[in-house]
Amino acid sequence: MTTGTGTRPMVRISSVRKCFGAVEVLKGISLDVPVGGVVCVVGPSGSGKSTLLRCVNRLETIDSGRIWVDGDLIGYAERDGRLHHLSPAALSRQKQDIGMVFQRFHLFPHRTALENVMEGPVVVRGVPKDKARTRAMELLERVGLADRAGHYPAQLSGGQQQRVAIARSLAMDPKLMLFDEPTSALDPELVQEVLAVMRDLAASGMTMMVVTHEMGFAREVGDDLIFIDGGVVVERGNPREVLAAPRHERFRAFLGQVL
């Protein structure tokens, strides 16, 4: 999906390549994500979909190509036609605008749900604790966990921990949210509570890139579905259309395994 004429996309990925040793994981991927759009990325294990997300928020450096988020070139400054690596401080400032939720929750085990959500604004942005606490409680309320604010991660279910992780990312007021298979580590009965929070985020206008195997979510919420295999985009389009009538045999075979 691309944005309309004259409208800057929230994410622009241009000819991105990434290698791990001799293995080329991303082979020149290009795509745009419009402001407020929800792009669902699907594909088999090892296809490069998670690596693509990690390149967007600079957890991985790309070997060639460029990525912009809200008009800012990620990881570099361009001067006189040449790219220069950003300083660690400048890169950190860029990454504050990009929230990411992983398969595993990565919560601080020695901090309560409330303290986990407060951590980023207080430590990174310097928000006063009382203000951060108020905002954190609002976010825990939003994800349905206000009554668990004083609980430690070990006292929460996997689904609850993942919802705290989402609230923690939202506490930084990101422009973009990245989700890397956020339900894959959950018991089946806990998946829907996390997807419900993600549906709410999409409805509120948050720009999202979601690596997922939840085809029902992609069909219902996604604006664009991208099937990656072998580091290239094999099929792409409106989720309801491409899931109903996939054009490529490789995508049909993949759907036969996950549906």
Image (spheres, rainbow, N blue to C red):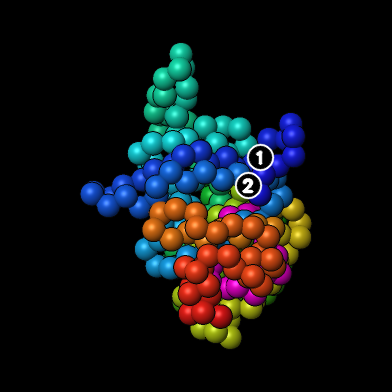
Disc 1/disc 2 C-alpha distance (Å): 6 Å
Residue at x 61% of width, y 32% of height: 71
- Residue name at image x 52 percent, y 61 percent: 227
Query: Could you tell me residue 202's position as x and y percent?
Result: 71, 59
Amino acid type at mark 1: Pro
Span of residues in magenta = 207-222
In the structure shown, which secondary structural element does the residue marked by tag 1 occupy? loop
User: Is residue 149 in the magenta section?
Assistant: no
Q: Which mark, by number, is residue 33?
A: 2
Q: Are marks 1 and 2 in contact (CB under 8 Å)?
A: yes
Residue 208, magenta (yes or no):
yes
Residue drawn at x 45%, y 29% is 76
Q: Is residue 37 above or below residue 150?
A: above
User: 12 or 250: nearer the eye?
Assistant: 250
| Residue 91 image position (x, y, % from top left) | 46, 35
Circle 1 is placed at which residue position?
A: 9
